[in-house]
Amino acid sequence: MSAGEPTPDAYFDAVYANGDDPWHYRTRWFEARKRALLLAMLDRPRYRSAFEPGCANGEMTAVLAPRCEALLAADRHARAVQAAAARAGHVPNVRVETIKVPSEWPPQRFDLVVLSEFCYYLAPDQVALLARRVRESMEPDGLLLACHWRHPFDEQACPADEVHRILQQETGYARTASYREVDFMIDAWAADGLRPTQREAA
C-alpha cells in the first residue's frame, strides 16, 4: 500500500470473506474492556443523536445504543452493515446504513460522534475531511470520541497518533479527556470545551 492512500476495499473484502467478526470483537476480553473504557469516557448519561461511522459488525453499536435517543451506525462494507444490522438493527433507536465516510456524510446533526478503530484506514487528507464533516454536523454541546490501536500494521493508512492530532487540529475542539495504553489510545473532545464536571454543574 502506497503512503498517503487509504486502505483498499479489497482488504475488507478479504477479511470479511472469513466471517462477520474478523477482529474478534465479540469474543475477546480485550475488546469488551475497551468498549467499557469508551463508555466511561462519555461526558453525560445520554445523547440526543449519535453517529458511529465505521461500525464494523455492530458490537460497539449495541453497547452505545442504551446511551442514545437515536443512533446511526454506518459502514462502507456490505458484510459489515449486514452484521451490524443483525446485532443491533432490531433496537428501536438504532439505524444501520451503508455510508462511505468521509466522502459521504448523513444530513442530520449530532451531539455525539464515535470513531472506534476506524480512522487509521483513511489517508491523512481523508481524516482531515472527516474532522471537518464532524465540525459541520456537530451540535454546540457535542462530543467527539475516538479510539485507535497504536501499533503499526500493514493495512494502516494513518497512524493513531496522527489521526488524533488531525482530528483535534481540524475540529478545533478542546480535548477534555485522554486515556493511553501501550496498545491503544482514547481521546474525547467537547465542541463547547466543557469538562464533565462543568457540564453537570451548568
Image: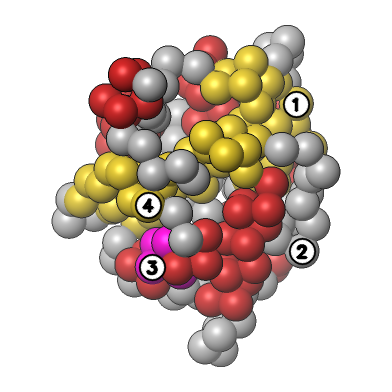
**Mark 1 crowdedness (10 Å alpha carbons): few <14, some 14-19, many ≥20:** some
Residue 153 visible, this orientation:
no
Residue 44, x across and y down, in percent: 41, 22
Q: Earlier in the sequence, mark 2 or mark 3?
A: 2
Mark 4 belongs to which amino acid? Ala
**Mark 3 crowdedness (10 Å alpha carbons): few <14, some 14-19, many ≥20:** few
**CA distance for labels 4 and 2:** 25 Å
Q: Is residue 4 magenta?
A: no
Classify mark 4: helix, strand or loop. Answer: strand
Q: Dot 1 corresponds to which residue?
A: 95
Residue 132 visible, this orientation:
yes
Mark 3 belongs to which amino acid? Arg
Residue pushed farthest bottom? 2
Q: Earlier in the sequence, mark 1 or mark 3?
A: 1
The image's mark for residue 165 is: 3
Q: Nearer the viewer, residue 67 or 57?
A: 67
Q: Is residue 201 left or right of residue 136?
A: left
Residue 42, x across and y down, in percent: 39, 29
The image's mark for residue 153 is: none
Q: Dot 2 corresponds to which residue?
A: 103
The image's mark for residue 174 is: 4
Classify mark 1: helix, strand or loop. Answer: strand
Q: Residue at x 62, y 38 (%)?
A: 139
Q: Earlier in the sequence, mark 3 or mark 4?
A: 3
The scheme the figure's colours follow is: secondary structure
Mark 2 belongs to which amino acid? Ser
Frontmost of labels 1 and 3 is: 3
The C terminus lies in which quarter of the figure? top left
